[in-house]
Amino acid sequence: MAVGKKRKLEFESPVYDLEEKIEAGRQRGLEPDSAEMKKLAGRLEELEEKVYSGLSPWEEVQLARHPDRPTALQYIGEIFDEFLEFHGDRYFGDDPAVVGGLASLGGRRVMVVGHEKGRNTRDRLKRNFGMASPEGFRKSLRLMKLAEKFSLPIVSLVDTPGAYPGVGAEERGQSVAIASNLKNLFDISSPIIVVIIGEGGSGGALALAIGDTVLMMEHAVYSVISPEGCAAILYKNKDKAPEAASSLRLTSSDCLELKVIDEVIREKHGAAHRDQHGNAEQIKRVLVRKLSELEGIPGEALLKKRVDKFSRIGIFNG
Amino acid sequence: MNWLKRARKGIRTWRRKSIPEGLWKKCPSCGEIVYSENLQKNLSVCSNCGNHFRISPDRYLEILFDRGSFEESDPDLSSSDPLKFKDSKKYPGRIKNAQKKTSRKSAVLTGTAELDGNRVALAIMDFSFLGGSMGSVVGEKIARIARKAIEQRIPFLMVSASGGARMQESILSLMQMAKTSAAVNLLEKSKLPFISILTNPTTGGVAASFAFQGDIIIAEPRALIGFAGPRVIKETVGEELPEGFQR
């Protein structure tokens, strides 16, 4: 794996240090199947296993937001053979924070929607860091209805800090836009598979996360509020975000335990940002399997199951 | 010069006027001091500016529905602490305080009652119970009463008052937006009327799920209604808010 000008988190450094050693070995002319290089490669694998497991919830948040973590469009490029992007909500405009279009997945035609955070600073600004405005939610619903019309299954890739909390978004009906996604997604009779690929931030995430199968990447997070927001409200101190992250139970294993998601997709090479292609393959494999499972179910039964699935979530006394 | 000197120290008044507590109320909107009894007669609406005072679910029952017709559903559903949420105060403690303060087990009152002789299913949120926040119990109770409306083929009336999701139940609270939306969807498929009344405030997860899905939406004058509250907008994006925004 190429070690370029990668941005790394503090706890990741042992992995990158070892990779530098391997790179140095390669430059010294050591063959990849020489004993020394093999030993180093073995150690790298062990180290990845060690460094990226048993992380604190706050470290998981850092990984989910990692600047090099693959975005929806990057995954789309890897997973699907073709992608034809559609734009606009037909009311106000096109929201670059949400993408979507027709795609093909190993011979199957599907509709893909997702939040797009952007790959570099300029792109991120354009895409408002994946924080959708009402237009984005309306576009996603429009495309999902289109998918239903042509009996295409839907894949939704969720990755957003949350819905955009701005004046314009409020004026154009942010609440209604999210609310009508939530209500109408229980009417779309096509199979919907949701993958939380990075940040599942609050209502803005949920608006694209109603589905028959909800999957979550190992190092993704899913929460009602950002740890910073939670810390600001509860402890009146944003610096307490790491504590808030633990309280919020936002990791993939927490969400699985709370029965909010169906399955965790393991990340290869420790974390998705270290192997975009390999991790896209991981997602693809699960998608193909889930699509085959859901394909045979008639629309009516699918909708009933979807309602039941979300009606079961919650824990209380009495 | 004895006549310039005070004979006794201190200021004395002849007699203390005693005014019973709560006889007068100050309108939080216009500052007018209104006589409680008149306010009560005027259905808790300020006679000067028309502001609706914040009132309890019981008061809504009294104002909106036929006397003695209310039958409560699921009164005993109460919050557990599924996440063992770490907080400055413990979540079960917060729940207990809110229960004591409101003499209610949760932040929403549900049931059926008659409105001019017509039976309706209803849910009324209580802002004084942890800001009317929606956790597992609130979501479940609203979903159940909507289903009851479907079973009995009666209209559904909802009075919302909430800051949004209940943080202490994190992802489970978020999922209540999905659960309540699914219930509203079924209500719509059953072609039953859903009237949604928005009171001050209706924001966050409640605004972005069932509250904005009414066939008829009625808002109390000057109630704060929106997704992100004014403070969140100012703090996160730093935008200045226009006068009367979200009101």
Image: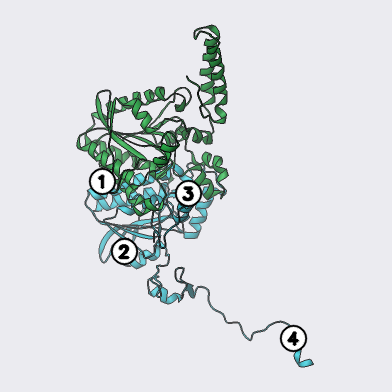
Identify the element where label 2 is drawn.
loop
The type of colouring in the image is by chain
Evaluate if marks 3 and 2 touch, with contact meaning CB atoms under 8 Å apart. no
Residue annotated with mark 4: B8
- The residue drawn where x is 51% and y is 30% is A7
Q: Earlier in the sequence, mark 2 or mark 4?
A: 4
Q: Is residue A242 above or below residue B31?
A: above
Q: Amino acid at mark 2?
A: Ser
Q: CA distance from mark 2 to mark 4?
A: 64 Å
From the image, state whether disc 2 or disc 1 is nearer to you. Answer: 1
Q: CA distance from mark 1 to mark 3?
A: 28 Å
Residue annotated with mark 1: A90
Same subunit, labels 1 and 3: the answer reads no
Crowding near the residue tagged with mark 2, few <14, some 14–19, many ≥20 C-alpha atoms within 10 Å: some
Chain B tint in image: cyan
Identify the element where label 1 is drawn.
loop
Q: Which of the two residues, A75 or B181, is positioned nearer the viewer here?
A: A75
Q: Earlier in the sequence, mark 3 or mark 2?
A: 2
- The residue drawn where x is 42% and y is 67% is B53
Evaluate if marks 2 and 1 touch, with contact meaning CB atoms under 8 Å apart. no
Residue annotated with mark 3: B236
Same subunit, labels 4 and 1: the answer reads no
Supply the letter of whichever chain is green: A
Q: Amino acid at mark 4?
A: Arg
Mark linked to residue B69: 2
Q: CA distance from mark 4 to mark 3?
A: 61 Å
